Structures are given as structure tokens and as C-alpha cells.
């Protein structure tokens, strides 16, 4: 059973461990753990999302909890509904970018505060395993419906400041980005790709981190005259960008651009960026009058740190963009809107806005299969003992002209390397040097 209870969510192949009966038990466990009276539940377009909703709702209402059915929505919309509707908890039924046979649950307590392995998911696993459920309530809870999309659209559309016409390619990957993008429909011209909801993902994986999935958008941009492209993942809590040439923009560069935009009207604000991000992100935040803060990788960690410092914005190298305006949670539509605002207000194309902040050379994230991750990290600690060392998430080693971070995967026998240097030659040399040590 442990296979479906992950570090940040519950996820597995539908019909194997993640069955309707399991979802019923998880619904009961969520009530047992949170004592929630009102729960909002949204779902993506996968064919088994509705049966999983029915089972979850049956488990929750058995104990007297009321369920607000959001129907089809994006994950950012479920976070927004949690706060907007004053719920005690929310559940988004999705497996994000995983293939069609997969599904799962992203669970939050009130104010869209996520449950992680350390803050509730392992407790849910124990409750399910032991069937440690309270007795059914004398009266079952009720199920009602609420369409959150119009409120979400109105709220975030207010941030639009488009100064001249734009033409944008948007790749929906047959997923709920179609709903997320209602925020900017009509504000600029959209050339859509794969805009039919289909949870089998017939065209490509809904994962902008996988550069193979960006090929269709690249071809579309290069075949016409467009200002940029936006490419959503499966539950629309992540978005990737291409410039007007169809070139991929590193996601930390988008973090820097949005941070600079926000700091123009919010000087002195705290901004977070994950520790895999370029040195340039910290520099742009400082140059723009903000306070830069490094965070661990993972939405639960970033959101907790944002709350602690009342941060305005955070960006993650995986394409998650977090806004105080959405309870410190993601809004990929707002990220797109800020980039659209920026491009529409500039006499330069997006590639020229990005160029000055692409100051260094990054390896990208490189995964290596290892037998003993702890031994690898210990070896690197000895080899690079003269570096400035940070142990926020894995190990980060910093030198005057280069740095790298190594982290162990939570779920696989992998070590993940991110490395950056001031010159391309040094990046390649140091990348190969560190990889040789990891892979011995």
C-alpha cells in the first residue's frame, strides 16, 4: 500500500492499489485526521476521476462532513476555492503529468495549506492500514455543487495590464489548462494546441519539464508570428514558456522576470526561489529591491516558508509559480498573465527581455542511478570540503565561479545534480567532474 502515499500527494495507477474502495477509505481517513466539516473537491479530466470523487465523497459524508463538488477544474482553482469558500480542507483528484492510467489526490487543510508526507500523508496511510476510523455520524453530510471558475477568472483577470495586442500559442495538452486559461481569454489572441479534454493524453505527455512535449508548440511558434508560447501540465499547476523564436525559456528565468515585475510596485517584499535556480535569480531580486530567500524543492516546503515570511511570490525550477494572491499557492494563469503584461509593455521581444538575465551557464537537472546515495553525498562532501556548504536540501557547494547541488530522490535510487558556472567551458568541465564522482 505504501506505494501510493508519496512525499507530496497520494498517487498510483487506477484499479491497482488506487481503487474506488481505497478512495472511500482515504476519504474516511481524511476526516479522521483533519476533523473537517466542509471539504471542497475538484477533479481533472481523467476518466476515473469521477468514480474516485464519488468514493471519496462517500467516505467523507459517512462521518457527517459536507462536500462541495467543484467538478472539473485546475489544481490552482481547487486551492482558490479552499480559501474562497472557507472550507476546512480541499482535495484535487489528479495525477498531474503522469500518464492516463494514473490518478491521485492533492490534499490541503484550510487556507490551502498542503499535506505532505511529514504533515499528514503518512498519518493517512497509517489510518487506512489500521482502519482506525471513527464511527459513522448519526446524519450523513451533504454534497453540493459550486462552479468556482467564474470567481477564479474574475479574481486573476484583474491583474491584466495588456498595452498592445499579443499573439500567443497555448498548448493545453488535452488537460485542464483549458479551464485555467479562461483567465486570459479575450485579453490577447490565442492559437490553441490540443484544446479538447482527454485524460488519455492522445498527443503528448502533459509535462513541460520534458522538452520532447514542447516540440508541437515550438513548431507552431516557428511557423507563424507569435510573441511567446505557454505550455501547461496535466493539472495546470505548472507552466512552461517558449520565446518568440520557439526557444525554451528556463523556468528560473521566468521566476526572475515575474519577481522583478512584482517588486516594481512592492519594494522590500520577500521572494522565494528554489535552491536549484540560477545565481541570476537572487541577483535580479536584490537589484529590484526585494529580499531573496532560498527554499527547498517541493511545493509543501515552499508554501510553508512563504507563509512564515509573508512572501509575495515564489518560483520553482519545475515551473510552479506561487502567489500570495492564491493563498501562497500556484496560479499558472497569473504567471502567464504577468509575462503577457511584460511583453505587451515592452518594445523588446521576450528573448531580448530574457537575455540580460541569462548571465550564467547551467547543466540542467541530471539524474544518476546509484546504489547508495548517502555514500555518494559523503564522497562529495570530502572532495569539495573547501566549498561554502549549504544543507537546506541535499548538499549545495558554492565556489566563486561555480556551484552545484546534489539531492537524493524521495522515491527512486537516484541522485539529482544541478550545476552552474560563469562560463560554459567551466560548467561542462565541472559537470563532467562531479558526474564522474557520482557514477563511480
Image (spheres, rainbow, N blue to C red):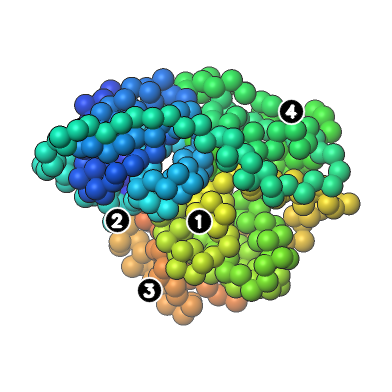
- Tell me if label 3 and label 4 are in contact, CB under 8 Å: no
* Quadrant housing residue 191: top right
Position of 237 with respect to 359 (left or right) is left
- Tell me if label 1 and label 3 are in contact, CB under 8 Å: no
- Residue 399's spot in the image, x, y percent? 55, 75
Mark 3 lies on residue: 382
Mark 1 or mark 4: which comes first in sequence?
A: 4
Label 3 vs label 2, nearer the camera: 2
Q: Residues within 10 Å of mark 2 (few under 14, many from 20)?
A: few
The kind of secondary structure element at disc 1 is loop
**Is residue 384 shown above or below 376?**
below
Mark 3 or mark 2: which comes first in sequence?
A: 2
- Residue 273's spot in the image, x, y percent? 55, 62
The kind of secondary structure element at disc 2 is helix
Position of 215 with respect to 135 (left or right) is right
Mark 4 lies on residue: 191
Q: CA distance from mark 3 to mark 2?
A: 33 Å
Q: Quadrant of the N terminus?
A: top left
Which of the two residues, 21 or 112, is positioned nearer the viewer here? Answer: 112
Mark 1 lies on residue: 328
Label 1 vs label 2, nearer the camera: 1
Asked whether the viewer can see residue 351, the reply is no
Q: CA distance from mark 3 to mark 4?
A: 53 Å
- Residue 202's spot in the image, x, y percent? 53, 19
Mark 1 or mark 3: which comes first in sequence?
A: 1
The kind of secondary structure element at disc 4 is strand
Position of 223 with respect to 427 (left or right) is right
Mark 1 or mark 2: which comes first in sequence?
A: 2
Q: Residues within 10 Å of mark 3 (few under 14, many from 20)?
A: few
Asked whether the viewer can see residue 77, the reply is yes
Position of 98 with respect to 237 (left or right) is left
Amino acid at each position: 500500500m505504501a506505494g501510493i502515499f508519496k512525499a507530496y500527494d497520494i498517487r498510483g495507477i487506477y484499479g491497482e492499489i488506487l481503487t474506488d474502495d481505497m478512495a472511500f477509505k482515504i476519504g474516511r481517513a481524511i476526516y479522521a485526521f483533519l476533523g473537517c466539516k466542509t471539504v471542497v473537491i475538484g477533479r481533472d479530466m481523467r476518466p476515473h476521476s469521477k468514480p474516485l470523487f464519488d468514493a471519496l465523497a462517500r467516505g467523507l459524508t459517512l462521518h457527517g462532513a459536507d462536500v462541495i463538488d467543484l467538478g472539473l477544474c485546475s489544481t490552482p482553482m481547487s486551492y482558490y476555492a479552499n480559501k474562497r469558500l472557507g472550507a476546512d480542507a480541499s482535495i484535487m483528484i489528479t495525477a498531474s503529468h503522469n500518464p492516463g492510467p494514473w490518478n491521485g489526490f492533492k490534499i490541503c487543510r484550510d487556507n490551502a495549506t498542503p499535506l505532505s508526507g511529514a504533515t499528514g500523508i503518512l498519518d493517512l496511510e497509517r489510518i487506512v492500514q489500521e482502519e482506525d476510523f471513527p464511527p459513522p455520524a448519526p446524519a450523513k453530510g451533504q454534497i453540493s455543487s459550486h462552479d468556482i471558475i467564474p470567481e477564479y477568472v474574475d479574481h486573476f483577470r484583474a491583474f491584466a495590464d495588456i498595452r498592445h495586442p499579443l499573439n500567443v500559442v497555448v498548448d493545453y495538452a488535452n488537460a485542464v489548462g483549458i479551464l485555467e486559461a479562461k483567465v486570459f481569454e479575450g485579453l490577447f489572441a490565442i492559437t490553441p494546441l490540443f484544446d479538447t479534454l482527454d485524460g488519455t493524453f492522445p498527443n503528448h505527455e502533459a509535462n513541460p519539464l520534458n522538452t520532447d512535449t514542447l516540440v508541437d508548440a515550438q513548431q507552431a511558434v516557428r511557423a507563424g508570428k507569435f510573441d511567446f508560447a505557454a505550455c501547461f501540465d496535466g493539472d495546470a499547476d505548472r507552466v512552461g514558456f517558449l520565446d518568440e523564436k520557439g526557444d525554451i525559456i528556463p523556468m528560473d528565468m521566468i521566476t526572475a522576470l515575474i519577481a522583478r515585475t512584482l517588486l516594481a510596485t512592492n519594494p522590500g517584499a520577500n521572494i522565494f526561489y528554489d535552491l536549484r535556480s540560477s545565481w541570476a535569480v537572487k541577483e535580479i531580486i536584490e537589484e529590484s529591491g526585494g529580499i531573496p530567500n532560498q527554499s527547498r524543492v517541493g511545493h509543501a516546503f515552499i508554501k510553508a516558508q512563504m507563509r512564515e515570511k509573508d512572501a509575495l511570490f515564489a518560483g520553482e525550477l519545475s515551473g510552479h509559480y506561487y502567489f500570495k494572491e492564491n493563498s501562497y499557492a500556484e496560479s499558472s494563469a497569473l504567471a502567464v498573465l504577468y509575462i503577457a503584461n511584460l511583453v505587451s509593455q515592452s518594445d523588446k521581444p521576450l528573448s531580448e527581455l530574457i537575455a540580460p538575465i541569462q548571465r550564467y551557464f547551467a547543466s540542467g537537472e541530471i539524474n544518476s542511478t546509484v546504489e547508495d546515495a548517502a555514500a555518494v553525498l559523503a564522497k562529495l562532501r570530502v572532495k569539495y570540503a573547501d566549498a561554502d556548504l549549504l544543507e537546506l536540501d541535499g548538499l549545495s557547494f558554492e565556489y566563486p565561479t561555480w556551484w552545484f547541488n546534489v539531492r537524493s530522490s524521495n522515491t527512486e535510487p537516484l541522485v539529482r545534480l544541478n550545476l552552474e558556472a560563469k562560463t560554459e567551458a567551466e560548467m561542462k568541465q565541472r559537470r563532467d567532474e562531479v558526474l564522474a564522482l557520482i557514477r563511480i
